[in-house]
Amino acid sequence: MADFDDEDGYQGTARLEVGERGFDVRVELRGYFQPIDGRYHWYGRIAADPALDEVLASGRQRGTLTTPQGSAAADVGDPDPWGRYRVEGYSTPPFASWFTAGEPPASSGEPELPGHVRVAVIGSGFGGLGAGIKLLEAGVRDFVILERAGSVGGTWRDNTYPGCACDVPSHLYSFSFAPNPRWSRSFSGQPEIRAYLEDVADRPGLRSRLHFDTAVTGALWRADQAEWLVSTTRGELLADVVISAAGPLSDPSMPDIPGLDTFPGAIFHSARWDHGTDLAGQRIAVVGTGASAIQIVPQLQKKAAKLVLFQRTPAWVMPRRDRKITAAEKWLYAHVPPTQRIARLGIYASREATVGGFVKHPALMKAASRLARAHLNKAVKDRALRAKLTPDYVMGCKRVLLSNDYYPALAQPNSEVVASGLASIEGSTAIASDGTRHEVDAIVFATGFHTVDMPIAKQVRGVGGRTLEEVWGGDMRALRGTTVAGFPNLCFVIGPNTGLGHNSMVHIIESQLAYIVDFIKTLEKSGAAALDTDERAQQAWCEDVERRMGPTVWNTGGCKSWYLDEAGRNPTLWPGSTIRFRRKTRRVDVREYVRLPAPATPATTPTMAMATNGAEQA
């Protein structure tokens, strides 16, 4: 295992206790302050140890880790390709010598930002790490990856709620160019996906370009120099090209509930889970019935005195065909890689085969609806509860969810489903829209993210100093989901109309990365200083997307989903197959861009504050 500096962490022996068993293990650990949620996190690896394999064979376990610096509760499990187990903990720093207790580190320990780079990448989730790998493969070495938190992972770092897992099969929810032969289950949990992304970040040449605790606070297009001035919490830098890989699932959406500030108990969003709050024996309200809620509810129901689920709209829930991946399969995937590629292709094809029901013929969803109803009927015998949990819209209009324990949890005596949204709070009383009142001790919001009002749009200023938010005016649009007119040399990963309702987003990300790399190559070949999206090309693309969106189940299914903006338009999903999207993003068509010439004379480099003030005065 790699050495750590004493100031960064600990490498040596430790005592791990899981249940009634104890193990002397070799560990390497790091700690960091997470400015996004104000908590201390620590994580690391336990060296491969056959003695651990048996106790961790059933999956991730909760235990206690003791080092010379102290003891702390720890989550352990999810072996990497070398048999090492991931271990991590949260909240109060257990190893005080790493931190100044209760305060962020005086210095992040990060290298200084360079003054100028060819490419600046924002975010280090799947999109940002994938961008880094593809840039290196293309021979682009002058780039940085700017990450606001203290480690990589994006969505899979920030979401640590109980039961957090992916609803796309493991082999498909990973890069085709970075397979993991040691996935433990058909559907991976959050810790295992995060561990996978840490391993991806360890690829040669990537770690040295990562800048942690570096939140981007603004980006201004300097037309006189044909470059971006990027402002961060650790200083400024100039970049010829900016790739925004912040993603749509990075900023939690909290509803504005009157009286919420009067609630005396714990309140938190699923994406900012407070692991320091013990919810055992409490009356817990869960708000929302999306992908996060159906994973949280079964976990909280087991420990709650009472669980109250506020449900505006019931979800279509299908069985989760999950199982352990056998040791023989792992060996085969590791030693005969084509077998894993075949397995991945089979999963991809089975998912892609369902696209017709989503985008062209919603009537095809009836067969799947019958399966979902049978799943509900089997788990819930109470007719009144079953009626509350039965959707009245076409399956697929909202995201189809997968769970084997959501319905059984809601059928338990300590669970109550309120078929209404949360309207207001009066002290410890949660009042539903239907007027019913419920006494609760804690409130968990599983209310999703800002998906149709991309937060970074407020921070990016393009031609003329206008922000992306101003240009969009509440109507997100982009050419091929990647570039926007008036914002030269700016590319988005998972931009408008790139989301999926039927397959893996990693496939879309890889398609966009190929397009972005070709964009940079095209820029270099053109001799221009920048490429700006042609407004007519963007309009033609968006009109075609909107036309294809018309007959989809998302527009005709009879529901109000998070896919839609306030005007009822769908700026979120791609109305077609992933095959079609990949074909449409295989190459950059130079006719869809305007070449901007190199600046004639150098100009003084302004600060972000100067640039913003200038834009406001213009």
Image: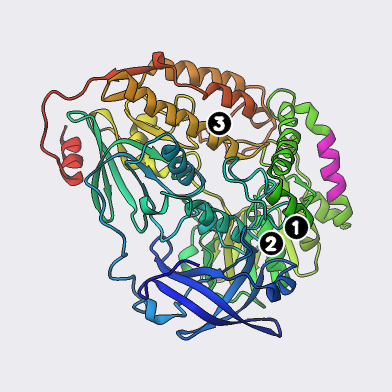
392 in relation to 149, above or below: above
Which sits earlier in the primary sequence, circle 3 or circle 1? 1
Check contact, mark 1 vs mark 2: CB within 8 A: yes
Mark 2 burial class by Cα count in 10 Å: few <14, some 14-19, many 20+: many
Residue depicted at 72% across the width and 68% down the height: 301
Is 155 located above or below residue 546 in the figure?
below
- Mark pair 3, 2: CA separation: 29 Å
Pick the front one: 262 or 347: 347
Q: Which mark is residue 307?
A: none
- Answer yes or no: do the residues labelled 3 and 2 have beta carbons within 8 Å? no
Say if residue 609 shows up in the picture.
yes
User: Which residue is at a point 54% across and 36% down the rendered structure image?
Assistant: 510
Q: Quadrant of residue 383?
A: bottom right
Say which amino acid is labelled 2: Val
Does the rendering let one see residue 323?
A: no
Q: Is residue 533 left or right of residue 153?
A: left
Residue nearest the viewer, comparing 566 with 475 = 475
Q: Position of residue 561 (x, y in %)?
A: 61, 39
Which residue is more in the foreground, 18 or 354? 18
Tell me how far mark 3 sits from mark 1, CA to CA. Answer: 28 Å
Label 1, on which residue?
Answer: 406
Task: Residue under label 2, please give it.
Answer: 297
Callout 2: SS = helix
Q: Residue 342: image x %, image y %?
A: 73, 38
Which is nearer the N-term, disc 3 or disc 2? 2
Residue stretch rendered in magenta on the structure: 367-375
Q: Which residue is mark 3?
A: 570
* Amino acid type indicated by mark 1: Tyr
